[in-house]
Image: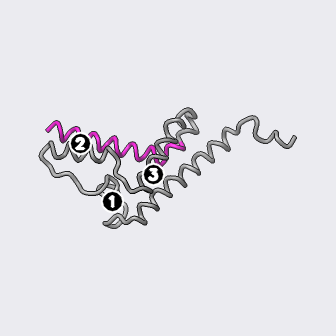
Amino acid sequence: MWYLIAADLVLVVHMLFIGFVVVGSFLTWRWPRLIWVQLPAMVYGALVEFAGFACPLTALQNYLLRRGGQAGYRGGFISHYLIQVIYPPGLTRGLQIGLGLSVVLIAVIGYGGYLRRNRPSWVGRAGR
């Protein structure tokens, strides 16, 4: 039973991490130092999608599920949990690349807003 509880905890952490990867750039508007954590997380999340490898949290969750007497799942976390909810069944390579591009695009929008709100003092003085 403890393994299943731990697997559920990993599931929650995994969901929070994905949320942080996708929309964490907007949190930097309020907490600018968060960029040092969010930017590497976003790059890692996009690389997982672009390269097509599984996140270590997926392997950990599968291990805990098997130790708890349940079958693990095939494929990655996104294809097992999120794609089934948001998209039609079957994660294709094109869809995976599209998800990676979406992560990068959302980050660009978020960091662009951050830079507009917190323009460094040296920006705009070059032409004076």
SS under mark 3: helix
Quadrant that contains the C terminus = top right
Residue furthest left as drawn:
69
The colour scheme is one colour
Q: Residues within 10 Å of mark 1 (few under 14, many from 20)?
A: few
Q: Which residue is mark 2?
A: 7
Q: Compare marks 3 and 2 and give the one earlier in the sequence.
A: 2
**Amino acid at circle 3:** Leu
SS under mark 1: helix
**Amino acid at circle 2:** Ala
Q: Compare marks 2 and 1 and give the one earlier in the sequence.
A: 2
- Looking at the image, residue 20 lies above or below residue 99: above
Which is more foreground, mark 2 or mark 1? 2
**Start and end of the magenta stretch?**
1-26
SS under mark 2: helix
Q: Main secondary structure of the magenta part?
A: helix
- Looking at the image, residue 125 lies above or below residue 91: above
Residue displayed at 53% across by 52% down: 106
The percent position of residue 87, horizontal first and vertical second, equals 37, 64
Residue displayed at 62% across by 46% down: 113
Q: Which mark is residue 47?
A: 3
Is residue 111 one of those drawn in magenta?
no
**Amino acid at circle 1:** Val
Is residue 4 one of those drawn in magenta?
yes
Mark 1 and mark 3: Cα distance apart in space: 22 Å
Callout 3 touching callout 2 (CB < 8 Å): no
Q: Which residue is mark 1?
A: 85
Q: Compare marks 1 and 3 and give the one earlier in the sequence.
A: 3
The percent position of residue 73, horizontal first and vertical second, equals 23, 54
Q: Residues within 10 Å of mark 2 (few under 14, many from 20)?
A: many
Which is more foreground, mark 3 or mark 2? 3
